Image (cartoon, grey):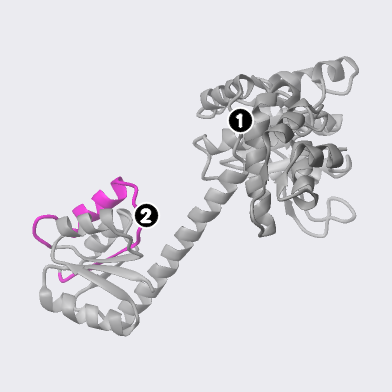
């Protein structure tokens, strides 16, 4: 049942609105002024606030400001007997969901309440999803090597400097890219990922820059490329070392001029993206072999972050295993298994050529095939 806070200094208005809202199966609490309303909002959860503007102690606009300054996300519907267009505009600018004049049209009021509650539910769902996404991409571990990576991320995230992430397969290069984006001022705009190794060379330019209808045989309609999709946000070019030379030249131009051309088009399109690239290859060797442009390398690698392999941060293995035990049990809808100390020591001694990705796969295997408490015998039996 949705919970609504009703704030109005007129007792008769409060009583009438409360009866109507309770008839519609809403739970309603009421107070007579903004100051008492603020205390309620700080100490209890409400899905919606119906608030008068002209009140003693603290008026509705002051309350609206105070709530949003405290970072409390809750929709407000403002109600006033002194309704003017200026009041409505001011309330909306300050973040109110709607503005309704007194005496309120009850049908309009109920429609506005339903829409505001839909927004409140959507905000709650979005917050939950963001927490899940943040948890999924959290960097687990407290080793010196990982702490150095985290410190570098914290320093560069607030800038627009281009970052080149270097590391073996499975070390968590994507996590580093996501952390940079989430800690940046672009966090509310998209992070668009392109796996340069997974796209055929003949399609990479269309993928990155888009194409116009009819620009090649299968181009039956216009397509917006990843650069345009990421405008205002971040473009993550994963496995940049596998990008064809022809595409590298166009990426270089885009970085130099902040402009792109769609395939088959002749119009310059301005783009505003932050570039983060990642590779498991030695790009300096690739430059010597004529496989990668040196000028592009220098454009991409303003900041370089080396992600250590798991063999160099084995002290993080217990933390990683504990997280994987929790996450995988949640995914499978099963009880979380435990692991004994000897089994953990064995995992620390193993040569993790596949890094964290391989470790997670082994933990999942041990959960499925091992005992309720994973033992060293289970590790020995199922690790290979």
Nearest the eye: 109 or 231: 109
Residue 218 drawn at (x, y percent): 88, 56
Total marks drawn?
2
Residue 66 x %, y %: 24, 49
Residue 78 highlighted magenta (yes or no) = yes
- Residue 34 seen: yes
Mark 1: give few (<14), some (14-19) or many (20+) Cα within 10 Å: some
| Residue at x-position 48% and y-position 63% | 122
Give me the residue at 33% from left, 77% from top. 26
- Secondary structure under badge 2? loop
Q: Quadrant of residue 355?
A: top right
Q: Is there any visible trace of residue 307 in the rendered image?
A: no
Check disc 2 and report the residue beneath it. Answer: 73
Query: x, y (%) of residue 234?
Result: 61, 38
* Gap in angstroms between the C-alphas marked 1 and 2: 32 Å
Assess whether residue 304 is covered by the magenta stretch: no
What span is in magenta? 55-81
Front one among 351 and 65: 351
Quadrant position of the C terminus in the picture: top right
């Amino acid at each position: 049942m949705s919970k609504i806070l009703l704030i109005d200094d007129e007792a008769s208005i409060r009583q009438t609105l409360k009866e109507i809202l309770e008839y519609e199966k809403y739970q309603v609490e009421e107070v007579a002024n903004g100051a008492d309303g603020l205390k309620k909002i700080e100490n209890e959860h409400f899905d919606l606030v119906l608030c008068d503007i002209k009140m003693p102690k603290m008026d509705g606009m002051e309350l609206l400001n105070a709530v949003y300054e405290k970072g409390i996300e809750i929709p407000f519907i403002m109600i006033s007997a002194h309704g003017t267009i200026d009041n409505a505009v001011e309330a909306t600018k300050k973040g109110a969901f709607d503005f309704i004049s007194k005496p309120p049209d009850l049908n309009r009021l109920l429609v506005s309440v339903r829409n505001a509650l839909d927004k409140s539910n959507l905000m709650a769902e979005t917050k939950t999803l963001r927490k899940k996404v943040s948890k999924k991409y959290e960097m687990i571990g407290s080793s010196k090597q990982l702490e150095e990576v985290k410190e570098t991320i914290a320093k560069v995230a607030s800038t627009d400097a281009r970052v080149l992430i270097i590391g073996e397969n499975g070390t968590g290069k994507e996590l580093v890219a996501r952390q940079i984006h989430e800690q940046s001022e672009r966090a509310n705009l998209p992070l668009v990922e392109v796996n340069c190794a997974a796209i055929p060379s003949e399609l990479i330019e269309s993928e990155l820059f888009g194409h116009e209808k009819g620009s090649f045989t299968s181009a039956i309609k216009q397509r917006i490329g990843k650069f345009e999709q990421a405008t205002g946000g971040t473009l993550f070019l994963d496995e940049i070392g596998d990008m064809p030379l022809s595409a590298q030249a166009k990426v270089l131009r885009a970085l130099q001029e902040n402009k792109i051309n769609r395939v088959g088009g002749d119009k310059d399109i301005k783009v505003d993206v932050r570039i983060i690239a990642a590779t498991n290859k030695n790009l300096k060797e690739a430059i010597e072999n004529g496989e990668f442009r040196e000028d592009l390398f220098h454009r991409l690698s303003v900041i370089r972050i080396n992600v250590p392999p798991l063999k160099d941060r084995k002290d993080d293995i217990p933390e990683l295993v504990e997280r994987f035990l929790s996450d995988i049990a949640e995914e499978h809808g099963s009880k979380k298994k435990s692991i004994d100390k000897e089994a953990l020591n064995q995992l620390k001694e193993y040569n993790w050529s596949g890094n964290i990705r391989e470790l997670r796969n082994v933990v999942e295997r041990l959960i499925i095939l091992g005992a309720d408490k994973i033992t060293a015998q289970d590790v020995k039996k199922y690790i290979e």
